Image (cartoon, coloured by chain):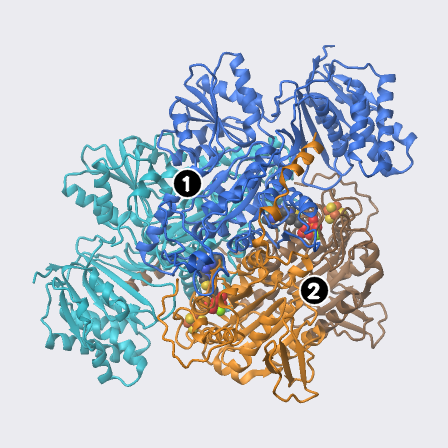
Chain colours: A blue, B cyan, C brown, D orange
Amino acid sequence: MSRLESVNDFVIKFANVNGTGSASANNLFAKAIFRMGIPVSPKNIFPSNIQGLPTWYEVRINDRGYLGRRGGIDIALSVNPQSMAQDIREVEPGGYFIYDNTKPLDLRLLRDDVNIIGIPLTQICNEQYDDPRQRQLFKNVIYVGALAALLDMDFKVLTALVGDQFKGKKKLVLPNIHALELGHQYARTHLDCPIGIRVEQSDKVGDKILLDGNTALGLGALYGGATVAAWYPITPSTSVVEAFEKYAKRVRIDPGTGQRNYAIVQAEDELSAIGMAIGASWNGARAFTATSGPGVSLMSEFLGLAYFAEIPTVLFNVQRAGPSTGMPTRTQQSDILACAYASHGDTKQVLLFPSTPKECFDFGAMSFDLAERLQTPIILMTDLDLGMNDNMSEPLAWDDERKYDRGKVITAEQLESGVEFGRYLDVDGDAICYRTYPGTHPTKGAFFTRGTSRDEYAVYTEKGEAYEANMLRLLRKWDTINEHVPPPITHDCGRETDTAVLFFGTSEESSREALDSLAAENIFMNAMRVRAFPFNDEVQKFIERHKQVFVIEQNRDAQFRTLLMAEFEFGPDILKSVLCFDGTPISARNIRKQIKKHLNGDNVLPLHRKIASIRAGESQ
Amino acid sequence: MSRLESVNDFVIKFANVNGTGSASANNLFAKAIFRMGIPVSPKNIFPSNIQGLPTWYEVRINDRGYLGRRGGIDIALSVNPQSMAQDIREVEPGGYFIYDNTKPLDLRLLRDDVNIIGIPLTQICNEQYDDPRQRQLFKNVIYVGALAALLDMDFKVLTALVGDQFKGKKKLVLPNIHALELGHQYARTHLDCPIGIRVEQSDKVGDKILLDGNTALGLGALYGGATVAAWYPITPSTSVVEAFEKYAKRVRIDPGTGQRNYAIVQAEDELSAIGMAIGASWNGARAFTATSGPGVSLMSEFLGLAYFAEIPTVLFNVQRAGPSTGMPTRTQQSDILACAYASHGDTKQVLLFPSTPKECFDFGAMSFDLAERLQTPIILMTDLDLGMNDNMSEPLAWDDERKYDRGKVITAEQLESGVEFGRYLDVDGDAICYRTYPGTHPTKGAFFTRGTSRDEYAVYTEKGEAYEANMLRLLRKWDTINEHVPPPITHDCGRETDTAVLFFGTSEESSREALDSLAAENIFMNAMRVRAFPFNDEVQKFIERHKQVFVIEQNRDAQFRTLLMAEFEFGPDILKSVLCFDGTPISARNIRKQIKKHLNGDNVLPLHRKIASIRAGESQ
Amino acid sequence: MSYQVPKFRHPGLPLNELGYTKADYEGAISTLCAGCGHDSISGAIVRACHEMSIEPHKIAKLSGIGCSSKAPTYFLGNSHGFNAVHGRMPSVVTGAALANRELLYMGVSGDGDTASIGMGQFAHAARRNLNMVYIVMNNGCYGLTKGQDSATADRGSATKKGDPNIYSAIDLCGTALQMGATFVARSFSGDKEQLVPLIKAAISHRGFALIDVVSPCVTFNNNPQSTKSYEFVREHSEATGTIDFVPLKKEITAEYQAGQSYEVTMHDGSSIHLYKVDETLDPFDRRSAISTLEEHRYTGNILTGLIYMNKDSRDLHEVMDTSQRPLNQLDEADLCPGNKMLLNINASLR
Amino acid sequence: MSYQVPKFRHPGLPLNELGYTKADYEGAISTLCAGCGHDSISGAIVRACHEMSIEPHKIAKLSGIGCSSKAPTYFLGNSHGFNAVHGRMPSVVTGAALANRELLYMGVSGDGDTASIGMGQFAHAARRNLNMVYIVMNNGCYGLTKGQDSATADRGSATKKGDPNIYSAIDLCGTALQMGATFVARSFSGDKEQLVPLIKAAISHRGFALIDVVSPCVTFNNNPQSTKSYEFVREHSEATGTIDFVPLKKEITAEYQAGQSYEVTMHDGSSIHLYKVDETLDPFDRRSAISTLEEHRYTGNILTGLIYMNKDSRDLHEVMDTSQRPLNQLDEADLCPGNKMLLNINASLR
Ligand SMILES: Cc1ncc(C[n+]2csc(CCOP(=O)(O)OP(=O)(O)O)c2C)c(N)n1
Ligand SMILES: Cc1ncc(C[n+]2csc(CCOP(=O)(O)OP(=O)(O)O)c2C)c(N)n1
Ligand code: SF4
Ligand code: SF4
Ligand SMILES: [Mg+2]
Ligand SMILES: [Mg+2]
């Protein structure tokens, strides 16, 4: 039988039952590979449930550093009878299927184009452990040990990692190492090691780190000086505030008093959470909230208020698959329009699109500067894929000289010295006005914040002209905002071409890989990664330079493309869509396939008709 | 001094204090004109407050039947000292300023290009009445009597109207007629009657009626078979449910039992209101809710659920000026994007755009057929201008043969006979599936409704393929929907032209007038009034037939144009914007001016830059 | 249709009056954690409905979002179900109940779903005396989002990984009473003998019937520091008395001792028998219910059983005076006034 | 800046300790209806703040949407104000209070704003014992949207144009008590002698202080069928006692009779004196407060005055143990851990 052969280049998928502690064992595996200097990209695929349902952990190992989803499984390691049929089906021909053969495999599942490897995990556990919980936990560690032998991993890396992971919990180190050894031993004794796929020490990760975007965001908020966090639990954004809290507990305790230099409130719902963030920002603290899915809809009324009353507001939206409750544990980039035009009436909201943990950290911290400088909500748009998976990333860094940009705030001294203050008076001509913090001055500088129309001195008015002037100033402000948000990043392919791709957020890795593989077929395209809305002029120029631009996004309705069309004055014939919305991160194969289909001229129907008649994404 | 002269063609504006009962007197005036066979279009301009602030009532009288706002005031009748300065300023040169001269006019207000007419209203009242409330109330009636003389109105029409208005309250008839006579008498004795502007019996109203859109909507819901109304008070939608209730109390009481064949619940907020409408619809009743402004934002989470779970839902959105609380008593068409893409994730909502009370009635009733046939939310988009003002309209009519279209519902008999039932199974190929009402059959036909992903049998699933297939079916359903919603109406100008206008809702009257006046300048344009989203193919063809299409809308961000661009595959260079967003209804003069500016080539900058640099609307 | 759990029907299984076995009232296999209190409550609902011989399709089960709100999938497979959005089940039930007054509305919610995001809707459904059974599966935490404290967590109680809760707890029974609920009870998922008759009584009651059921979350909130653990609740609960439900038309066979026992006839003709334990509580007097509850709160005990019932309850349909025929069964003839009335209206508008 | 009401300052006007006249605590001219109860409450707030010599800029006044929520524009013109969205004032205050614990937060709301759309936020602000004064201008109707019943309207009460209300009324004092509020009072807009000292006590209290003020809507709900009319309230209110507020450092001059009089020292060192009328009520015992309230509800009387105060109240900041220095005054040095820590974090992630 053919068998896949490769070194440092494969996809392995673990199939487990959730609530059994498999995630940490699988993580041990991924991190060990990473420590061997090989780029990895693990993705946790978990159900919206706590215990007993199938869960998967897909790890891509790739020496060339492609970190997006590739599509296809080379090795499946399945310890979950519920999903075994599906797991074995997904293996590429020539691939490997590793399973717990304490119970024999159902013969109907057998595939003769796949290499089947049995390890009697349950049996080993039952022999070694009496406690049922231990049996369950160590089973996972044992298969990691076995994998080390099968893939020719450096066993010392694994044992060192265990030491690091249980630092402070010494008692746990030895039993875990023992379990690793059990698996390792078994494989070396009973199985053909290594298999065709294996790993070798490499040097491709440099000083990179392995970190999930939500933790990076929480750290970004911490470094950005956030003192108030108000939130309501929801997957996949919950861990943003949890990370913020974890680190705040370490570094934000006043050494003298033991008191906290931060406040975190679990609100009663998302309406309240964003209300709190707005109230705190209004009162001069840096505040944020984080949410996902339905939370975004619930926050829309307040987002409209913050836009119109110009209150700095930071919202981290970790997107998941919608609409409604949708697929709460799957990824998508489908809140683009809901956020860009959040709330009734004419609004335009600022969006940031990080694509790595490093950018989550940077943009996370920057959000507060932007919110206060621009006096408007800043919505940072990440997603489950980036937020909840360990992503390889540049290390985090902070310039210790950096000062927070607190924006335009008038002080008591300035008021005292007779500065004219009108809350909505465009003094500097950039359409951004000065504010005062409550409590600034006994008799000067007070104003009334409201969601109703008002004049430049914040006095209530129903005069159409005053309302209109204010709305037009907000439009002018949009141009100022444009100058402050992070610019796009362009990759020139170095050849003459009139075709390009444009993407944002987590489509980056797969897009880059797809471009490389298209280049290998002599299809050359320039690329731009957009990092913010409003779109910088560069975006417009980039699109204008090309005859066709593929907009890659992870939603059904090409929402980002709609935004590009609404903001610029060129025809949609230029903008073609590459979409994936089945809840999995878009893969390089999928992008390549869709682009080639377009280039072959398959795409002449109007967009929505077309999508309806073909399947846009691939689920594999 | 020059004085304006005209017959049956002028604009008169009454300036009052709110809470003084002026609205009914002013209405008496407008209706009397209407009964004289002359087209009128009264607009109430009121503050967001209950008592004591300036309020205006602007009536356009126009024999040619132009009913949109014209812009400019020919006659101002001011009994409010607070607003007098502004009122007199607004009068066109040669126009008339009528005021209560019991107190002398502040000389600084005097204009020598305006005809000033004083009537000692307070003095007359003080002489005639002792009770302060009577003094206040009858003051308004007296000036209507005076106007009758000044404008040469048929006094008998007025007295007959009073008789009709106080039918059942006989005791009020004579005092009101007396007050009318007081004013009439005074004017005829002391003033030069008629003035240059006057009215003459005409025959231009045919069988038309004078009705506000909200009452028409309430009646539409009643005729459409709505039995459950859930709402939360908010201006300007409150009177929709109030009208529904008023008529339901008359015609929906079971004659045998005296019980109600309807249920109206004032919910605790808008989230709850739409939840109730959804619950009732799910359970097989026709239900609706009505809201405005912030209510739309608050309903977005539930709108996403109804879209995704495919629950018939009827929402009447009477738009007002946003964002946030905005200008709650002013008009706008600015919830287009918030409604079309309501909620997070990929959603597309059906919108209907009535432009007359008759259409409010028709579309209101039709909403229930559409919601049940299409199994999705139907959002009827009207606005304050249409909803709260008396609009001249075709009479309402109902075909007594008409049956409600209850959509695809499987009965107990069908289940019994073995019909296969899967709630999300596309049996007919039109992407609309069958549902059952709860309680249909003891053992067959039950299913679980949810906002999470599910398979065709409504069973929860997290399988990407099942989710994707469902989302693609929803896109195909969009095409089916397209075939059911009201098509656009086209007005061909009868000449060769490559220019057109496209509008919707309350921009119709002013657009029509603007087109006529442009035609008088030899600028000919075709016109299309869009009545629904999704846009019919006809809309696309119409736009394609032209080189330039002016999209007329009453919001800042050209939201409707964005929608057109997002849905179709032609360039935005074709679509030009004509906007008004100062809270007043768009006027014909304003439209004409903006179009001419465009035609003169003033419009080369990208849209948002341009708007920011010029004033888009006129406030007059 | 949507429930494909193969059901083995034992020929000897007891049938109810309608000829159904208990299995006919079951749902899909639960995906909750083994040992989760919610599953026991589902079991009690199944038992109550089976024993009362309610036609399964005459029940509509509705919920919000959470582990608890998933539970309706796991019972009453022949009933229509509706998983609404988080915290908004009461409004959906209100609409549904208005549309068809003839079904039984079984609402299921969690403490997060009800006491936090759903507080407003819960309060107002109670205030309107909506005719429904409202069961809260109360575990003092957010199970589905992994164990954060909920608003019913007691001050000082801690979940598996959390710090002790610093906020005062919301008592859903006390809240419902304040709002005007007409039937208020508390129970424990581990006490089926108490819970099943309470569910039956709640079903028979016409009006808003709350049962706040303490239902431990074994995964996140069953640790010793928690006041919502199996152990704590077993040790600290104090019953108001025992309750017996006697279905309509059944002859009363048991001997009821006078004095501490009350027989109450419900709206549907069935009756409940109460044996009081707590002498201070008169469950038919709101003042007594409110002060007894508060007294127990003060002492830190969990009062379970029937806490309050308004015998003269008039539900939403009654106070609104809606038609006896369900609104969703009315047709054009009932609803549409016809063109003639429009002619009159038109005339009045000229 | 935003208040351009020309103020004529009479030279002889009494100055408070800070040297301000009452006019310095006033706001823009009211646009509410003449005779509206809300204006009287604004007046009481002005008087209380002036007499307590609170620096006006150390007050933040926040509200939702409604006639009542407009009121903050009409008092305290030198304080920052915030008109939030309908029903969501409590969350905005929560955030604001977290940001700066040193200001006084004066929240104003209506019965629609609080008891309907705002029920959830109201309940949770109370539960968290947020340090604020929460004044409800309670007219039993929706003034600004023209007179619909609100959720505090009594059953059977009718507004000017409405049918009698068919729902049970929400008692905001009872609700706040249930939720864990630590200061609960009720008053009447027409009774300044009672209202002003209550406002002062609420200001001095550290924690969530609710004053539910019945405040007739003259335009829509002051008719004889209404239980929120001036006349009805005058006739049916029963005071818990009288209350006297003695500012910090002031010597107590009046003679207080022992027995029915209590002196209570507040967190800020000032004190209140209570003269009880109702012997059954112990306003320092929650159980007593809850049952007395319920008793009055039963008899249909309106209990006014201080209903409950927790002398040991610990507010949100205290239970959260946040820094004494307001969070909004912390800077980079306090907040940013610097690059060194990142180096460690990075290392742990390799
Ligand atoms: C609007 C919204 N916010 C947040 C969530 C995330 N969420 C799902 S379940 C849940 C809490 C459930 O707690 P509870 O109601 O107590 O149920 P339990 O899981 O404890 O049974 C939350 C916050 C959501 N689905 N929707
Ligand atoms: C989300 C939202 N829904 C509805 C409204 C309309 N609205 C304005 S004020 C008000 C009710 C106010 O009642 P209340 O709080 O009792 O204040 P009052 O006017 O009686 O003082 C409503 C419903 C709104 N502004 N926002
Ligand atoms: S997490 Fe807790 S509440 Fe959820 S299923 Fe498990 S035990 Fe039950
Ligand atoms: S309507 Fe009522 S509440 Fe509003 S200002 Fe007038 S009297 Fe006051
Ligand atoms: Mg819970
Ligand atoms: Mg009110």
Q: Which residue is mark 1?
A: B484
Q: Is residue C342 above or below residue B519?
A: below
Q: Secondary structure at mark 1?
A: helix
Q: Nearer the viewer, residue A331 or A357?
A: A357
Q: Which residue is mark 2?
A: C173
Q: Residues within 10 Å of mark 2 (few under 14, many from 20)?
A: many
Query: Is ligand 2 closer than 8 angstroms to the Cβ of mark 1?
Result: no
A316 relative to C31 in the view: left or right:
left
Which of the 4 quarters of the picture holds residue B31?
bottom left
Give percent across and percent down for residue C344: 32, 63
Name the residue furthest left: B1
Task: For the N terminus of chain D, give its image quadrant.
Answer: bottom left
Amino acid at dot 2: Cys
Q: Secondary structure at mark 2?
A: helix
Give percent across and percent down for residue D301: 59, 81
Q: Is residue B390 visible?
A: yes
Amino acid at dot 1: His
